[in-house]
Amino acid sequence: LALSAGSMNAPSARKNDGTVIFESSRIARHLMEAGIPSNSVLCDWISWDTVANVWVVRTVADALVALARPERVLKLDAGPHASAGRVGGLLRVSVFISDFHAGRFHAAMDWAFNLQPSADYTGANALVSHHVTSVSSVGVDWGSQDEFKARQAHEESGAAMLRHNAESGVASTVTEMAAYLLLGGHMGYHKFTHDTY
């Protein structure tokens, strides 16, 4: 799953005809150039920030778990594997993200994967595990040391806010998270879509 339509904080790349190039499309191209078949790459065209990124990850994980349920597999596959009742085991969600952003992303993933219902994501019978792996941001041009420090402070503040949102019940169910993002609770999206960001 290649994440992100783009960013509310930076202009989107564009094709020659002016249409937007999603960040996920560039990630998908990189993955395909590295030998991943295109039919194995999903692209996110919905999210424009960290919270929506993880909402998309959770939504895709929910969809994959639903498709892999034994009762669904039995309905779809009357072949020799149907009677075995296998669903392919644990779905491992591994996120690779820049080291400076990993803490905030991890806080958001914890929030999203603890939304109710979460029976498939917790305990001994969990069907999904998630892990955030950071990759080095060495070589990123931050402009100045002060800009880098400001970005670090932004990331730390964002991680703290995400942990607070999760603990305080801003959204504790999948439906409440959808409402938070889509119905105006997320002020960044509200401002961005109302052109006051």
Image: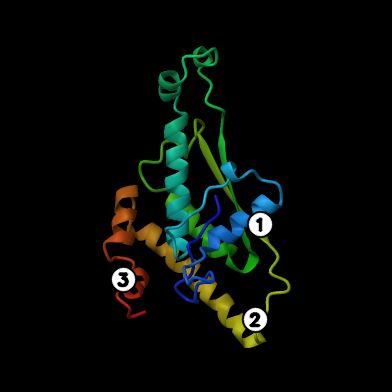
Q: CA distance from mark 2 to mark 1?
A: 23 Å
The residue lying at 50 percent from left, 34 percent from top is: 127
Horizontal side of residue 99 vs 79, given as left or right: right
Going by the picture, which residue comes out furthest to the left? 183
Q: Quadrant of the C terminus?
A: bottom left
Marked residue nearer the N-terminal end (3 or 2): 2
Does the CB distance between marks 3 and 1 fall below 8 Å?
no
The disc, 3 or 1, on the residue closer to the chain's N-terminal end is 1
* Element type at mark 3: helix
Q: Position of residue 125 (x, y in %)?
A: 49, 30
Asked if the residue at tag 2 contacts the one at tag 3, i.e. Cβ–Cβ closer than 8 Å, the answer is no
160 lies above or below 93: below
Task: Say which residue appears at 47% left-offset and 30% top-offset.
Answer: 68
User: What is the CA distance from the residue labelled 3 to the residue labelled 2?
Assistant: 28 Å
Mark 3 to mark 1 CA distance (whole Å): 32 Å
Q: Amino acid at mark 1?
A: His
Rendering coords of residue 58 (x, y %):
45, 48
Q: Residues within 10 Å of mark 1 (few under 14, many from 20)?
A: few
Instruction: Tell which residue pokes out farthest to the front in this image.
Output: 17
Q: Is residue 23 above or below residue 80?
A: below
The spot of residue 173 in percent (x, y) is: 33, 49
- Check residue 190 in the rendering and tell me which mark sits there, or answer none: 3
Secondary structure type for disc 2: loop
- Residue beneath the point at 44% across and 60% down: 47
List the residue tagged with mark 1: 30
Which quadrant of the view contains residue 51?
A: bottom left
Q: Which residue is mark 2?
A: 142
Amino acid type at circle 2 is: Trp
Question: Quadrant location of residue 149?
Answer: bottom right
Q: Callout 2 environment at 10 Å: few (<14), some (14 to 19), or many (20+)?
A: few
Residue closest to the eye, 158 or 72: 72
